[in-house]
């Protein structure tokens, strides 16, 4: 999705003002200006694709001027958005601490799905539609409707002991 750099016809500053109060301002590298209107995870994914190398949270934090924690969230989000980003993930031991550092390699950034397409597959003609409403999974109290069963079982056990 190519667009005007940050909605401006003048020089691109790189600072991205965000609309949500719980999101901080971040910096978009000048090479990412055409995608400034996309969500941050897609801009990061496109940047990672251009790098043609494994990237980690420290790389993202340094380039986009965001906190390490937020950079980690971006890595996590990218690796889980399979419908938009094709990537590989690896875990590299972090120097001597026994922890592992996550790195991703971006293979492709896929185009946005067409909004006109329906996501539900067509239903076969000979299969009836499922009924809407609550369904029972057969999980719950096995004693429902058998209020006297437990007492009968206990009584049977007690009578069996008296025979001995």
Image (cartoon, grey):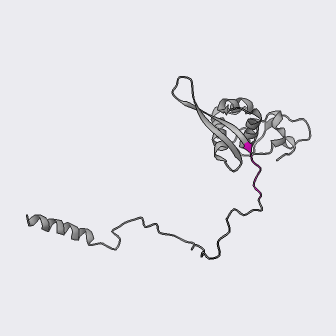
Q: Which sits in the foreground, 164 or 63?
A: 164
Q: Residue at x 67, y 48 (%)?
A: 82
Magenta: main secondary structure equals loop
Q: How many numbered marks have been drawn onto this rendered protein structure?
A: 0
In this rendering, position of residue 95 left or right of residue 21? left
> Furthest residue to the left?
164
Can I make out residue 22 in this image?
A: no
Q: Position of residue 77 (x, y in %)?
A: 65, 43
Can I make out residue 30 in this image?
A: yes
Q: Position of residue 4 (x, y in %)?
A: 87, 44
Q: Residue at x 88, y 41 (%)?
A: 8
In this rendering, position of residue 78 left or right of residue 4? left
Q: Position of residue 5 (x, y in %)?
A: 86, 41
Q: Residue at x 68, y 32 (%)?
A: 54
Q: Is residue 127 above or below residue 111?
A: below
> Splitting the image into 4 quarters, where does residue 100 fall?
top right
Q: Residue at x 86, y 36 (%)?
A: 12
> Splitting the image into 4 quarters, where does residue 129 fall?
bottom right
The quadrant in which the C terminus is found is bottom left
Q: Which residues are magenta?
A: 108-114
Q: Which sits in the foreground, 26 or 47?
A: 47
Q: Position of residue 42 (x, y in %)?
A: 74, 43
């Amino acid at each position: 999705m190519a667009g005007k750099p940050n909605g401006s016809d003048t020089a691109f500053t790189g600072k991205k003002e965000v609309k949500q109060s719980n999101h901080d301002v971040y910096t978009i590298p000048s090479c990412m200006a055409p995608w400034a209107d996309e969500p941050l995870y897609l801009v990061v994914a496109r940047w990672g694709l251009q790098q043609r190398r494994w990237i980690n949270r420290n790389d993202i934090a340094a380039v986009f001027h965001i906190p390490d924690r937020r950079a980690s969230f971006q890595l996590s989000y990218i690796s889980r958005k399979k419908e938009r980003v094709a990537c590989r993930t690896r875990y590299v031991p972090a120097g001597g601490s026994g922890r592992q550092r996550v790195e991703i390699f971006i293979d492709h950034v896929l185009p946005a799905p067409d909004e006109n397409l329906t996501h539900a597959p067509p239903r076969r003609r000979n299969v009836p539609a499922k009924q809407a409403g609550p369904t029972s999974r057969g999980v719950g109290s096995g004693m429902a409707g058998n209020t006297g069963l437990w007492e009968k079982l206990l009584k049977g056990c007690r009578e069996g002991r008296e025979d001995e």
